Image: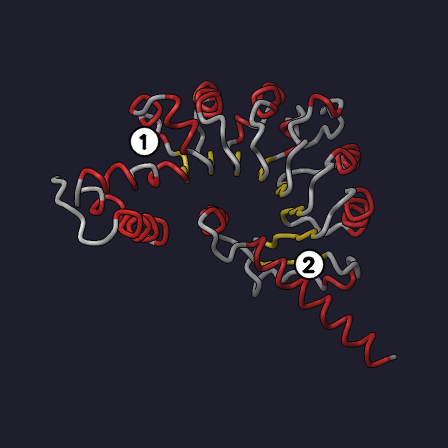
Amino acid sequence: MHDADPVLPVELERFIFELAAWQDPETIFPLILVAKRVYMWIEPELYHIVLFRKRLLPMLESKPAEFLRQHVHHVAIFVELEYADVVRILSTCTDVYNLAIWNTAANRPDLLPLLRKLTNLQRLSTNLFALFGGRDDFILDQFRIPPPEELPFTYLTHLDIFGLFPKGLWPVFGMLPRLTHLSLTDTVSPELISAALGTCPVLQLLVVVWGGDPVISPPPDQSKISTDPRFCIVLCSLFEIDWELGARGGRDVWRRAEEAVANKTRERQKGSDVRE
């Protein structure tokens, strides 16, 4: 690694390197070898989006806590890490904006105080039934919804819920003051959909993510579930890939659902114009 004088203006050179690293993360490692200044510019890109596997845990020891707090913004925990490791991650990466907790052991009431400290958290994917204490699929009333002041949902705009969602959980829909986007996985209960649409105070979109093979297990006719223009069903079977795509600003489930709802709204408006 050397530090030869730049040919382009420094600001432009930095912009080009950062753009290349963001658009194609696989180029980061060769790029950081170009020059010391390039290393300083784009090394943080390695940490903006983190899909935690066990082999990435040493990262917590490799960088100062302040560096991780400043640069880690998107975190997905999708392997069976020890709960203590999950606590370490969330206690260190406290400026997380987008968090997916797909680790079964991590979704538990003990995690709520940690989540409340993530004051920049706007996007969350979690199993609410387990997060509120539900553990047994056959005992659906063992969870407890905490009072609103104990919930980590104050700033959430996007919430993806998977797992069981018994009727006793539905009051949580009224405790999401800023939620505009709600996703439910493979859940097509008309009563549940109606409750969410009618209770979330500022909801703009409700998408059911259908993870099954559309040939073997096609999604139901969404018009038979809800005619609300904010509702749609979107196919997605590769959740990890889709999550990372969205973290990088790509066309993920949320983006495709927004497009579907916008198209539905336009079609409805056209029909209204024709009738007039």
Direction front: furthest residue? 9
In x, y percent, where is residue 72? 42, 33
Residue pictured at 28% horizontal, 50% vertical: 17
Q: Is 237 left, or right, of 173 in this rendering?
A: left
Give the CA distance from mark 1 to mark 2: 37 Å
> Nearer the N terminus, badge 1 or badge 2?
1
Give the residue at mark 2.
232
Front residue of 107 and 181: 181
Q: Is residue 168 left or right of residue 109?
A: right
Answer left or right for 84 relative to 232.
left
> Could you tell me which quadrant the N terminus lies in?
top left
Task: Identify the secondary structure beneath mark 2.
Answer: strand
Residue 154: quadrant of the picture: top right
The front one of 37 and 8 is: 8
Amino acid at the residue labelled 1: Arg
Residue 105: x and y in percent read 53, 26
Percent of width and height locating residue 131: 63, 27
- Residue denoted by label 1: 55
Report whether 272 appears left or right of 47.
Answer: right
Residues at discs 1 and 2 in contact (Cβ within 8 Å): no
In depth, the one of 183 and 180 nearer the eye is 180
